[in-house]
Image: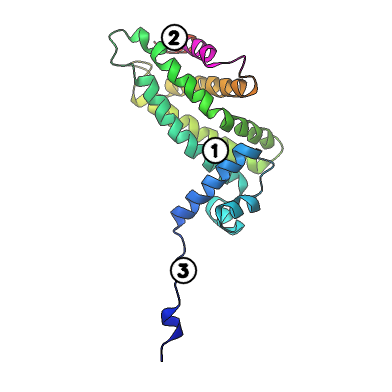
Amino acid sequence: MTDATSTRPTTRRPRRAQVRADVLDAAREAFLTHGYAACSVNDIAAEAGFTKGAVYSNFGGKPGLFAEVFQRDFGRATAQLVADLLDGTGLRDRAQLPDVAAGRLADLVIRQAPLQVAVGEFCSVAHSSPEVAETYAAMRADQLDLVADALHRQRLLGDGQDLADHREAAVLLLAVLSSLSLEHRAAPELYPRAVLIAALTRFLAGLLP
């Protein structure tokens, strides 16, 4: 007699890393499509194929989930951003660096525009929600640390400048990129790529020594 349990198919639970990745993918699409406030944890979890418990156990709630989406996307964008800024370090004339970097940064601004709109909404919610405000502050602090450290390690501002100097540069750089992303998203006819390149060239010329 055959043991029924021996022929029953086994169902493997997905690994934690895969659960997180699937939820993040579903959340990113939801936040970019509908914004922060209009998305529910239930809907995001269902789209990813899990229960809302998977979201809470992995991310602590919707604010933490949004911060993870932002940091994952921003981490990729930052790596490209730093590479763009340093791409011209081999030029004979360092003064050409703003021109070299501006076009690539303009493309980054355009690609990141939908995400920056969602971040702007997240920031607005932070004004009335202590939980969101705490998450937002931590998210921005991590962002600044990441960029400042990258710029400092590459000595983008030249020798003799400490981490605090590069953090100030990171604040300015991120503020400009975020602002241009929002403006481009709202009025692309006023902020086409050519205008973005011109503005970023001027900004970088003043930022870099």
- The residue at which mark 2 appears reads as 205
Q: Decide which of tag 2 and tag 3 comes sooner along the chain.
A: 3
- The residue at which mark 3 appears reads as 11
- Which range of residues does the magenta coloring cover? 189-201
**Residue 128 pos. (x, y %):** 72, 37
Depth check, front residue: 138 or 193 = 193
Q: Is residue 200 magenta?
A: yes
Q: Decide which of tag 1 and tag 2 comes sooner along the chain.
A: 1
**Whether residue 168 can be seen here:** no
- The residue at which mark 1 appears reads as 138
Residue at figure coordinates x 31%, y 16% from the top left = 89
For the residues marked 2 and 3, what is the alpha-carbon distance in whole angstroms?
A: 58 Å
Q: Is residue 23 above or below residue 4?
A: above
Residue at figure coordinates x 43%, y 22% from the top left = 166
Q: Amino acid at mark 3?
A: Thr
Give the left or right position of residue 195, taking residue 186 as reference.
left
Residue at figure coordinates x 48%, y 29% from the top left = 144
Residue 91 marker: none
Between disc 2 and disc 3, the foreground one is: 3
Q: Is residue 5 above or below residue 20?
A: below
